[in-house]
Image (tube, helix red, strand yellow):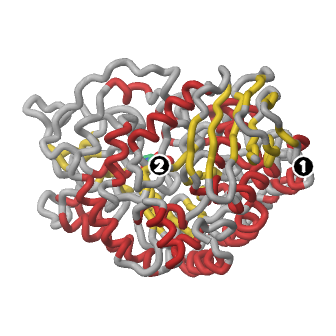
């Protein structure tokens, strides 16, 4: 066997798997990425509450691992931050990188989570937030205590301009200038996000060493890798020059961030020196036994610059690909974006696909429940690692949060940017609290459809979104063509349809996705059998030389 058919993702870590990756012309980054299989993101506040306070916690995640490994069938769990934090940005504002906030549990709970994942063959990756710390972090407290403090240079401090104005024109992603005045020491400090999230100075070698120690802390506890928060932000222009103005954003094609989009962000992030940091980080990961993985959150839409984060097979295993998240739901746009990424991902590297996360409106909210089913087929059959966002497998909608109940600091500062609507609690069972909590009121409201869209109800409905995900994941796990086979776009597909082939020694598949609400006839060179359709009644149906796609239908056809 050369391809790993029916083997778990971890097979790629075996000697046989390593040899297979080499034969496929894949580099180490790709092999390690493949060994992570399908990734599932858990937002810990919203997955499972075990203490009855309305907020999810680490023991809650542990208690739901059977769902992830057996019921759903994913391979790697990524958990968003659980570190001690004042929770100004719900845990992305960290006061101690090497501990667990009591809200989420203890280090002992974390160790039990790692062990429970590994017992089930799941891998566990955690968020690592290198760009900034909470202003309550002891490092920042020291840094702001005096200009002479040894940690002063650990953060980015700057004098006002001669006329007393801000050091430069840099903006915070969360609205307003990126500079906060510190009256006590008479300088500004930089914050790319909230004023209570001060940017670390990665040009300072002690910062680098201290932050790399935080990686070692978790690697030593057995984590399989990291999702690196705003990875490209950590290196800025050393001369701190102004950003130039930007051309107007095409808001149909990209999500608008308001005032932040008025600048070309060439100086406040993404300085080429960032690559040296990631080469060092990769060397650190590689020095550990087993496969340790790094995926970067990188919102760069110049694809060549984005692909540079793979380095020379010596930086990140993958930069997250956000190209599809805000693409309008049109076959041509999706095909163009997928083609564009295909052109820049090196042949030895591994692509990846993302349709949602804790920062973006839910896929169902963006394109509607029927199209979201087609999108599930796309996500799980394209070439590359899929990352699933908790609850999307249930078809959870984007929840309207009334302005007076808004929790997200971004939404509070910049109307319209709130992210609470995609962070509502996971829905496990019908009834009060949806099996998420026994508290009368969870930290964010449940969706109005929690009685219908929940794991228990959906498991017993063959046509549910959950069963669609399960069928797709099972097929992907057993078919090498779908996990790591060839990919070829069928360019003669009719308007409104995206079609492609996935090929491999053990069999080929055609994937046909109808982006429209009309039936469309697709001609095929070979017939076969429907392996999975968004319409489960079609599963197993024979396919001839043409196939009529129903409105909003996606099918995976096993070719003869
Ligand atoms: C990126 C994270 O994904 C987001 O949730 C967070 O608000 C920002 N980093 C700032 O910390």
Q: Residue at x 65, y 70 (%)?
A: 7
Q: Nearer the viewer, residue 469 or 77?
A: 469
Q: Is residue 191 left or right of residue 479?
A: left
Residue 501's quadrant in the figure?
top right
**As drawn, 124 above or below 252:** below
Q: Position of residue 10 (x, y in %)?
A: 58, 72
Report the label total.
2
Which label number is shown at residue 462? 1
Disc 1, ligand 1: is the CB inside 8 Å?
no
The verdict on label 2 being within 8 Å of ligand 1 is: no
Q: Quadrant of the N terminus?
A: bottom right
Q: Nearer the viewer, residue 145 or 21?
A: 21
Q: Pinpoint residue 197: horizontal percent, then vertical percent.
A: 37, 51
Q: Is residue 281 left or right of residue 424?
A: left
- What's the distance in space between the residues labelled 2 and 1, CA to CA? 32 Å
The local crowd at label 2, few if under 14, some if 14 to 19, many if 20 or more residues have their Cα within 10 Å, is many
Q: Is residue 405 left or right of residue 281?
A: right
Assign a secondary structure to mark 2: loop
Tell me if mark 1 has few (under 14), some (14-19) or many (20+) residues whose alpha carbon lies within 10 angstroms of its own: some
| Label number found at residue 320 | 2
Can see residue 379?
yes
Q: Residue at x 58, y 76 (%)?
A: 114
Q: Residue at x 47, y 67 (%)?
A: 225
Image x and y of residue 511, in percent: 69, 40
Vertically, is 523 above or below 134? above
- For residue 94, say whether it is visible: no
Along the line of sight, the residue nearer the viewer: 242 or 14? 14
Question: Where in the figure is residue 187, as x and y percent of width and height?
Answer: 17, 46
């Amino acid at each position: 066997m050369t391809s790993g058919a029916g083997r778990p993702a971890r097979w790629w870590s075996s000697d046989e798997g390593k040899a297979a990756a080499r034969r496929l012309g894949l580099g180490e980054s790709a092999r390690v990425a493949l060994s992570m299989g399908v990734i599932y993101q858990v937002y810990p506040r919203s997955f499972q509450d075990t203490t009855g306070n309305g907020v999810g916690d680490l023991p809650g995640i542990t208690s739901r691992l059977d769902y992830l490994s057996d019921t759903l069938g994913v391979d790697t769990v990524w958990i968003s931050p659980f570190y001690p934090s004042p929770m100004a940005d719900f845990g992305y504002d960290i006061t101690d990188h090497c501990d667990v906030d009591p809200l989420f549990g203890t280090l002992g709970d974390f160790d039990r989570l790692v062990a429970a994942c590994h017992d089930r063959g799941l891998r566990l990756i955690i968020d690592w937030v290198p760009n900034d710390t909470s202003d309550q972090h002891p490092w920042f407290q020291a840094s702001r205590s005096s200009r002479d403090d040894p940690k002063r240079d650990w953060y980015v401090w700057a004098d006002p301009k001669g006329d007393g104005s801000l050091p430069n024109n840099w903006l915070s992603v969360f609205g307003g200038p990126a500079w906060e005045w510190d009256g006590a020491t008479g300088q500004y400090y930089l914050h790319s996000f909230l004023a209570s999230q001060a940017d670390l100075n990665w040009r300072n070698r002690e910062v680098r060493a201290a932050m790399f120690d935080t990686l070692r802390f978790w690697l030593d506890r057995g984590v399989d890798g990291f999702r690196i928060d705003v990875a490209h932000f950590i290196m800025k222009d050393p001369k701190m020059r102004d950003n130039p103005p930007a051309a107007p954003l095409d808001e149909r094609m990209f999500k608008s961030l308001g005032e932040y989009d008025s600048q070309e962000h060439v100086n406040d992030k993404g300085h080429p020196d960032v690559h040296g940091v990631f080469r060092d980080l990769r060397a650190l990961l590689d020095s550990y036994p087993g496969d340790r993985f790094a995926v970067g959150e990188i919102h760069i839409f110049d694809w060549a610059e984005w692909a540079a984060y793979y380095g020379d097979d010596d930086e990140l295993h993958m930069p997250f690909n956000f190209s599809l998240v805000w693409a309008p739901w049109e076959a041509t746009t999706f095909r163009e974006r997928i083609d564009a990424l295909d052109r820049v991902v090196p042949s030895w590297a591994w692509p990846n696909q993302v349709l949602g996360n804790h920062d973006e409106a839910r896929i169902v909210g963006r394109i509607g429940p029927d199209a979201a089913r087609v999108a599930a087929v796309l996500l799980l059959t394209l070439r590359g690692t899929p990352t699933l966002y908790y609850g999307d497998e249930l078809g959870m909608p984007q929840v309207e949060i009334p302005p007076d109940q808004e929790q997200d600091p971004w939404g509070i500062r910049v109307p319209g940017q709130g992210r609470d609507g995609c962070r509502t609690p996971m829905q496990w069972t019908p009834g009060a609290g949806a099996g998420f909590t026994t508290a009368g009121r969870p930290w964010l409201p449940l969706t109005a459809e929690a009685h219908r869209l929940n794991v228990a109800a959906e498991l017993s409905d063959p046509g549910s979104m959950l069963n669609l995900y399960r069928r797709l994941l099972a097929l992907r796990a057993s078919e090498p063509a779908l996990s790591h086979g060839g990919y070829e776009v069928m360019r003669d597909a009719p308007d409104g349809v995206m079609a492609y082939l996935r090929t491999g020694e053990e069999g080929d598949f055609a994937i046909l996705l109808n982006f429209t609400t009309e039936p469309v006839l697709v001609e095929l060179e070979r017939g076969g059998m429907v392996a999975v359709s968004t319409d489960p009644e079609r599963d197993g149906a024979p396919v001839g030389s043409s196939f009529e796609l129903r409105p909003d239908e996606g099918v995976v056809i096993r070719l003869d």
